[in-house]
Image (cartoon, helix red, strand yellow):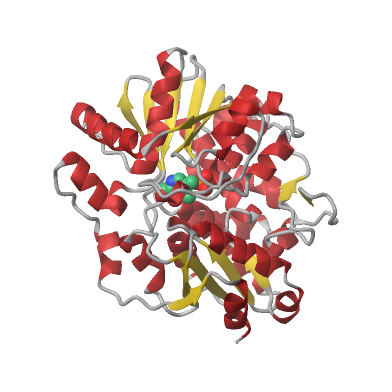
Amino acid sequence: MKYYSTNRKSIRVNFREAVLKGIADDQGLFFPEKIEALPEEIIRNFQKTGLTELACTIASIFVKNDIPDKVLSEIIEDSLNFEIPLVKVEENIFSLELFHGPTMAFKDVGARFLARCMGYFTETSKTITILVATSGDTGSAVANGFLGIEGIDVVILYPSGKVSPLQEKQFTTLGKNITAIEVSGTFDDCQKMVKQAFADPELKKRINLSSANSINIARLIPQSFYYFFAYAQLAQDSLPLIISVPSGNYGNLTAGLIAKRLGLPVEIFLAASNINRPVPDYLETGEFKPRSSLETIANAMDVGDPSNFARILEMYDHSWKAIRKEIIGYSYTDDQIRKTIKQVYKKTGYLLDPHGATGYLALKEYLYDHPGIGIFFETAHPAKFHTIIEEVIEENLIIPDRLKQYNKREKKTILINNRFEDMKSFLLS
Ligand SMILES: *Cc1c(COP(=O)(O)O)cnc(C)c1O
């Protein structure tokens, strides 16, 4: 498999190079040159195989020749060493719980797979510095995914005061090969600084920079595995399948579109967002207008200029009409999210987190006047947002030990302004 750049000015590369570079020389995003549908029989057979075997089949399409089968299956077993259960919430509505990994958010899947692929590739190359911007969950998943992996240093940029205290502790207390930079600014500032770093000739020459944001293709590919796994667990294929994805930077949804190209029978995808709605607006009007992000209680989705949108456009030859046939956009306010968390909890006993709640809401809205079986993704454990949830349901939550352990550790960060030069001098020092 070859990967081309969405800006189409760079040469095509193999998986290894796409992963190590993170972003193409022309600043485009890498994307597989062609994605062919798997035979139906293989997809049907996924109902009998476990997650790892299913994942190996799909992964080998994308990494063949770059990682030997045996190593690949070790990487997958090690990355996906937690449950991804499909839980029935109510009639025709299921939650795919993606939060049973070490940092209790779905980004563990992509970050752990990426870290292990990179670890394998660096055995034969020089030390890499991973530069990543986070609005919360990326930082914790990447930091924990890469912790202790040899030959790789990780530098995480995050907006000061704009991630939840628990999230912050998950990536500012680890030490070892992980450094956290606290930026006085917004997530968009952080993302811009990272983009600028990749385009800076001096940095490029002096350090071996790479990315672990969902612009890295190795974060994206493993996310397509669980779409198939959700379908396999459903074992019910008479009704059209609807998948609702709480979206911010649109990596998760892009992985779903890849799964569909690979043959997964999805009728329609719902792009569920908070009030940061550049994509829902695009789907409605045909015009894509990036903007500054607004703060919400579903903060991992506070993205005003989603990077993966370029890949979505590419997959549909930039045709608004074609995109609209397969994706419907929804956008919800904090109030609606809060109400939903409360109502669903009271009615069914199922506790949503603010991100999952947008997915649930979109699904409800769609299924109101369309038939179908719906799956929404629960992208984070509700306890990660316990202050918000406790206020909404007026009950105390039990915080899992996995999250509590971080609280005991000491935060260590480097404070800088939202100026590229400040970050650059840190990286060169
Ligand atoms: C990152 C994240 C999202 C958004 O995923 P994208 O791939 O950026 O669209 C949703 N929910 C949670 C909890 C996240 O951490």
Quadrant (top left/top right/bottom left/bottom right) for the C terminus: bottom right
Q: Is residue 356 above or below residue 205?
A: above
Q: Tell me if I can see residue 213 in this picture.
A: yes
* Residue displayed at 70% across by 59% down: 23
Q: Residue 40: image x %, image y %?
A: 64, 25
Location of residue 82 with respect to 331 vertically, above or below: below
Q: Is residue 106 visible?
A: no
> Residue 176's spot in the image, x, y percent?
45, 80
Relative height, residue 99 to residue 365 (above, below): below
Residue 354 versus residue 423: which sits nearer the camera?
423
In which image quadrant can residue 89 be found? top left
Please tell me which residue is depicted at 57% across the width and 60% down the height of the picture. 191
Is residue 291 shown left or right of residue 138?
right
In the rendered view, tell whether residue 327 sits above or below residue 151. above
- In the rendered structure, the answer to whether residue 74 lies left or right of residue 19 reads left
Q: Quadrant of residue 192?
A: bottom right
Location of residue 171 by image quarter: bottom left
Residue 111 percent location from the top left of the image: 52, 58
What is the tally of numbered marks visible in this picture?
0
Between 147 and 276, the one nearer to me in the picture: 276
Relative placement, left or right, of 92 versus 248 is left
Residue at the image position 63 percent from the left and 27 percent from the top: 285
